[in-house]
Amino acid sequence: MTDQRTSFPLNVIRRLGAGALDGVQEAGRMLLFLLSALLCLFTHVPKVGRFVRRVQFIGFQSLLVVALAGAFTGMVLGYQGYRTLSRFGSTAMLGPLVGLSLLKELGPVLTALMVTGRAGSALAAELGIMRIGEEIDALEVMGLSPHQHLVVPTLLAGAICLPLLTAVFNVLGILGGYLVGVKLLGVGGGVYLGEMAAYVEMRDVLEGVWKALCFGGFITWICCFKGYTARFGAEGVSRATTQAVVISSVVILVWDYFMTSVFF
């Protein structure tokens, strides 16, 4: 009995240590994967055709879901913001509330989460199927770089599309807040837009742009890595896709806090 009580905490510590080591090794492999992709980016010309297809897939095909999410997020912000501000007699500040909330935080974060769920999961699954189908191995046998053909165009497309999708999200969110606040709840249209213009500065816009740019890189990097390293058939692809979405979502939220607290 004494041996069992003594071995239990040791087993817990052993498992925690093994998990920590696995995490460090995985982080190292992810970093090497990113460095290899960046090396290809600066030493080879990206594949234009594949880049355009990735822009269409990540950006254009995500446009509808991002637009809907932005419009209804702005409507909710307008409604809830009006109810909160009306308690203090400050409904004139509804415009800055909606604008700053969208531009600085909700726009880039929610856009990144939507793109992760729609496009990131598909990217991981596509590369995972190519890995277990030995298509990636075939590229290597032919002397072609999988990073150059598969990863670099995706990274570039993600970094370009996320700021643009975030801009769409923000514009429609501000319009949604305008519809609810001005047309439904009676806030003056000039007050809504005028106070927003007075309080929203260019650095607030740039903060959201930089966040979206980072999120686009993180999403494509993590999802490509998880798909690229998938193993063990369909179950492995499913696991890699799930891990890609979960890790990307957590990294988005953690990095958002880090950028907000350190850089802005």
Image (tube, rainbow, N blue to C red):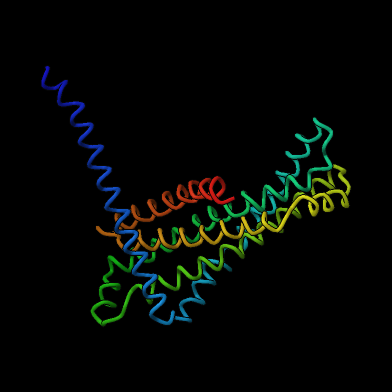
- The residue under the point 42% across, 49% down is 246
199 vs 32, left or right, is: right
* For residue 261, above or below residue 44: above
Q: Position of residue 210 (x, y in %)?
A: 57, 59
Q: Which of the 4 image quarters holds residue 162?
A: bottom right
Instruction: Identify the residue shown where x is 39% and y is 70%.
Output: 38
Residue 13 percent across, percent down from the top left: 22, 33
Q: Nearer the viewer, residue 125 or 103?
A: 103
Q: Is residue 200 left or right of residue 244?
A: right
Residue 66 or residue 218, whichever sits in front: 218
Question: Is 132 positioned to the left or the right of 157 in the image?
Answer: left
Residue 7 in the image: x percent, y percent?
A: 15, 26
Residue at the (46%, 77%) spot, across then down = 50
Tag count = 0
Q: Is residue 187 above or below residue 120?
A: above
Residue at 80%, 52% in the rendered image:
198
- Left or right: where 31 falls relative to 87: left
Quarter occupied by the N terminus: top left
